[in-house]
Image (cartoon, rainbow, N blue to C red):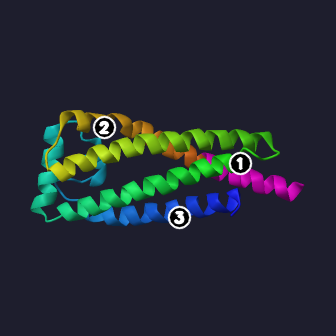
Amino acid sequence: MTLKRAFLWTWIGGLVLFAIVIALSLPLVLTEVPGGIADHQAAATAAEVDRIQNAWRLAGLWNQAAIAMIGDLVFIGVYGVGCMLGGRHFMTSSTSRVRSLGMVALMAGFLFLATDYTETVAQFVQLVQFEGDDVLAGLAATVRPIKMAAWIIATLAILLALALDRKSRRTA
């Protein structure tokens, strides 16, 4: 399999998994937890994690939360690797802007992998223990904005590189 084909399958597969994870997370949106899983990610204290998890438990959604987080762990790996493969692929381009975007996608994909795994593992440990932990909650909340920025940057870099690569192939 070529690097381009591996990138496309992995990256697009990651997008499909992202849609599945969103669907799995929708039931976690409650009056008490209006942001659903995002509220759990942003909860910076054990007390807030406990409040969210208690709301889910009272609504019978503990298993749904666990399934959504496991799905997120799978998505993170597939999408992050897809961004990194895309970055490596675009770094071989004859167009300097595409090569630069490839480097950005590679670095942002790696940062996304590291920060989103840190966040989600910290969340999952608290969920499985059914007890918030100030250190884990703080860690998850701290890396969340970095993860979000890395995800956005990697995604935009891939999309722009795809467009520029296609344009350069048409004009060649």
* Mark number, residue 141: 2
Identify the residue at image location x=16%, y=49%.
129
Q: Is residue 28 among the parts visible in the rendering?
A: no
- Whole-percent x, y for residue 125 in the image: 23, 47
* Mark number, residue 90: 1
Mark 3 surroundings: few (<14), some (14-19) or many (≥20) residues within 10 A: some
Mark 2 residue type = Ala
- Whole-percent x, y for residue 29 in the image: 25, 59
Mark 1 residue type = Phe
In this view of the protein, which residue sits in the foreground, 26 or 15? 15
**Which quarter of the rendering shows the N terminus?**
bottom right
Residue at label 3?
13
Q: Secondary structure at mark 2?
A: helix
In this view of the protein, which residue sits in the foreground, 111 or 154? 111
Task: Give the alpha-carbon distance from disc 1 to disc 3, as whole Å.
Answer: 18 Å
Front: mark 3 or 2: 3
- Whole-percent x, y for residue 25 in the image: 31, 61
